[in-house]
Image: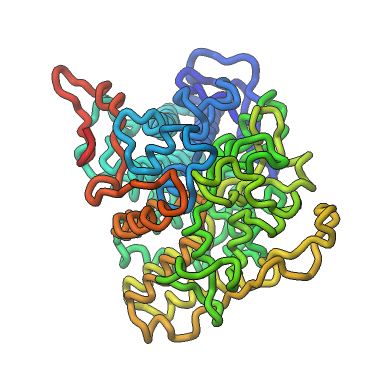
């Protein structure tokens, strides 16, 4: 169970942070007595540091099952960014019915303005994380019972986390104020690009974090290196990113000491029974059925995102789009249709098996819950299509351990990988293609595609459709075909083709994981891709009919009006609104 998240006056007496190597160190019961001062010693620093980790999921332990750290809805600040990264990126519809959660629909249609409550929630939760990291760094300077090595490690962890929170803010809002442990005037203007400060935090973390950790939820040197390399990619600093990717891919290990490598089974990334593997670079550690008395530690951000009417209690949100589904159709050579995928029929042609680990579709086993029945599990198909999310769903066979029933909607113990190794490989491929190292780029993409082609990554029919928990047969559930790109394809066809293939591979591999919108913005193609998406998908569903993306405005969300109002310094508002918003 996670520590109480109100840390402004928190001191937890007697709590250390050592635990068995397999434990989830955030899952702790806070002691009943809290003192009203911060104690500048090792225990006080460690308590604050655990609190900084505790902000990763954005949820408030004391606020009930659907409360986030800003007091709003928990799903509005889900750390996987399912709304901002996937719904806004065309991976998914809002889902449910048309009138359910207007703030989400406005975001999906890019009609959300500065008063959208979810944007204010997101801003406040990320800055809560920043504040907790700064509190660690302030107190650390006063601690007298810590060795220099202990102080350096604690500072590296705090700066890693701060880099993460600021990265999220930067991707969402672009120009945001940088506030650190030395800031005295909190009404800091948002007039400077903060990528350099984010880079500095990750660089410090990379240089000073341990190679391995006794607790799996803590980042190590290589996790910081991956974050730093990804930060360079957002800044298009390819020559800086390449040597980092070279080191990560040849030397990188997880916090447990495992060499980075893809698992044979794609689904291992989304199953609580197979988490924290060689593929997990940095993950939020979720837990179910703990002794907290609530489901607050059980991935609350995804609690709405289960099929409607089926064996789950809620709620029909986050439905994959037809555009996403069609993207998995493959040609006779097992390659994707990079440009023409929406002219093909997913029901009659071969598909990449990652489709059926990502999307619940009619006639295909839905984990071990039975064959997906189609619209019977859909709340309003006319609004959001015919498909269900899948990566966030727990297995029936292990629900006693990994499903938490204490909230009004499902909770589960499936970790969320903020960054996983396939993400790193595809970023490395992109970096190499930008530098015109096409053979290396192709190699990295093909590592990801070869995993998709493994028999372990296929989905198989049940032995008995009426008894899905009796197990699976050896008969594939669909006509699967996926293959690596032929050797030399990228070099022969050139940079434009190589980048298109890499971008598409990120769409397939990382779908429904909150990355898509931020990738499209990073590549400078969001207006083209999303307006084409609205034209295609709007002809099929009501929710995005008439939606549109405005280039030069919608790459970033509006600075919350509430925050602009609070930034008043005399008669001047310190925070400036993003272009195109009022």
Vertically, is 376 above or below 74? Answer: below
Q: Position of residue 67 (x, y in %)?
A: 53, 25
Classify residue 425 as left or right of residue 254.
left
Residue drawn at 30 percent across, 34 percent down = 113
Q: Nearer the viewer, residue 370 or 5?
A: 370
Q: Nearer the viewer, residue 557 or 342?
A: 342
Classify residue 354 as left or right of residue 184.
right
Q: Position of residue 549 (x, y in %)?
A: 30, 49
Residue drawn at 64 percent across, 16 percent down = 32
Quadrant (top left, top right, bottom left, bottom right) of the N terminus: top right
Q: Nearer the viewer, residue 153 or 532?
A: 532
Quadrant (top left, top right, bottom left, bottom right) of the C terminus: top left
Determine the image quadrant of residue 524: bottom left
Residue drawn at 53 percent across, 78 percent down = 331
Classify residue 560 as left or right of residue 377.
left
What is the count of numbered marks?
Answer: 0
Q: Position of residue 310 (x, y in %)?
A: 70, 42
Query: Can see residue 130?
Result: no
Determine the image quadrant of residue 70: top left
Q: Position of residue 297 (x, y in %)?
A: 62, 33
């Amino acid at each position: 169970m996670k520590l109480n998240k109100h840390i402004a006056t928190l001191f937890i007496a007697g709590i250390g942070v050592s635990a068995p190597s397999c434990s989830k160190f955030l899952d702790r019961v806070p002691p009943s007595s809290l003192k009203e001062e911060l104690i500048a010693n090792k225990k006080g620093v460690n308590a604050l540091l655990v609190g900084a980790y505790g902000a990763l999921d954005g949820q408030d332990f004391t606020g009930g099952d659907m409360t986030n750290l800003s007091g709003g809805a928990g799903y509005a600040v889900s750390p996987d960014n399912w709304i901002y990264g996937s719904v806004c990126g065309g991976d998914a519809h809002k889902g449910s019915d048309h009138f359910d959660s207007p703030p989400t629909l406005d975001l999906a249609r890019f009609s959300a303005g500065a008063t959208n409550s979810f944007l204010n929630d997101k801003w406040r939760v990320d800055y809560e994380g920043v504040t907790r990291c700064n509190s660690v760094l302030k107190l650390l300077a006063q601690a007298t019972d810590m060795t220099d090595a202990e102080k350096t490690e604690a500072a590296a962890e705090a700066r890693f986390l701060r880099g993460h929170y600021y990265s999220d803010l930067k991707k969402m809002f672009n120009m945001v104020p940088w506030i650190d442990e030395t800031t005295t005037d909190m009404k800091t203007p948002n007039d400077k690009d903060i990528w350099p400060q984010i880079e500095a935090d990750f660089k410090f973390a990379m240089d000073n974090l341990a190679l391995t950790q006794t607790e799996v939820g803590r980042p190590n040197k290589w996790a910081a290196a991956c974050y730093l390399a990804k930060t360079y990619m957002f800044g298009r600093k390819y020559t800086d990113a390449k040597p980092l990717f070279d080191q990560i891919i040849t030397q990188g290990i997880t916090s447990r000491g495992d060499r980075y490598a893809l698992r044979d089974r794609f689904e291992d990334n989304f199953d609580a029974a197979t988490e924290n593997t060689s593929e997990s670079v940095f993950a939020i550690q979720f837990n179910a059925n703990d002794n907290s008395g609530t489901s607050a530690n059980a991935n609350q951000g995804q609690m709405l995102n289960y099929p409607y009417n089926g064996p789950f209690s809620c709620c029909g949100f986050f439905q994959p789009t037809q555009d996403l589904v069609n993207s998995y159709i493959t040609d006779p050579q097992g390659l994707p249709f990079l440009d023409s995928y929406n002219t093909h029929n997913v029901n009659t042609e071969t598909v990449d098996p990652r489709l059926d680990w990502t999307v619940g579709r009619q006639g295909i086993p839905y984990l071990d819950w039975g064959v997906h029945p189609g619209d019977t599990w859909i709340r309003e198909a006319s609004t959001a299509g015919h498909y269900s999310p899948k990566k966030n769903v727990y297995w029936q066979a292990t629900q006693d351990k990994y499903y938490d029933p204490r909230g009004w909607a499902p909770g589960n113990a499936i970790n969320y990988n903020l960054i996983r190794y396939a993400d790193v490989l595809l970023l490395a491929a992109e970096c190499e293609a930008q530098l015109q190292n096409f053979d290396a780029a192709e190699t990295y993409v093909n590592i990801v595609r070869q995993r998709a082609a493994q028999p372990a990554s296929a989905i198989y029919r049940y032995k008995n459709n009426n008894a899905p928990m009796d197990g699976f047969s050896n008969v594939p559930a669909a006509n699967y075909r996926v293959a690596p790109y032929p050797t030399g394809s990228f070099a022969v066809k050139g940079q434009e083709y190589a980048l298109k293939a890499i971008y598409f591979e990120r769409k397939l591999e990382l779908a429904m994981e909150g990355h898509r919108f931020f990738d499209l913005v990073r590549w400078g193609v969001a207006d083209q891709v999303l307006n084409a998406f609205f034209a295609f998908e709007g002809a099929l569903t009501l929710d995005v009919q008439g939606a549109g993306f405005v280039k030069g405005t919608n790459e970033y969300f509006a600075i919350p009006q509430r925050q602009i109002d609070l930034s008043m310094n005399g008669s001047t508002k310190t925070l400036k609104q993003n272009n195109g918003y009022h």
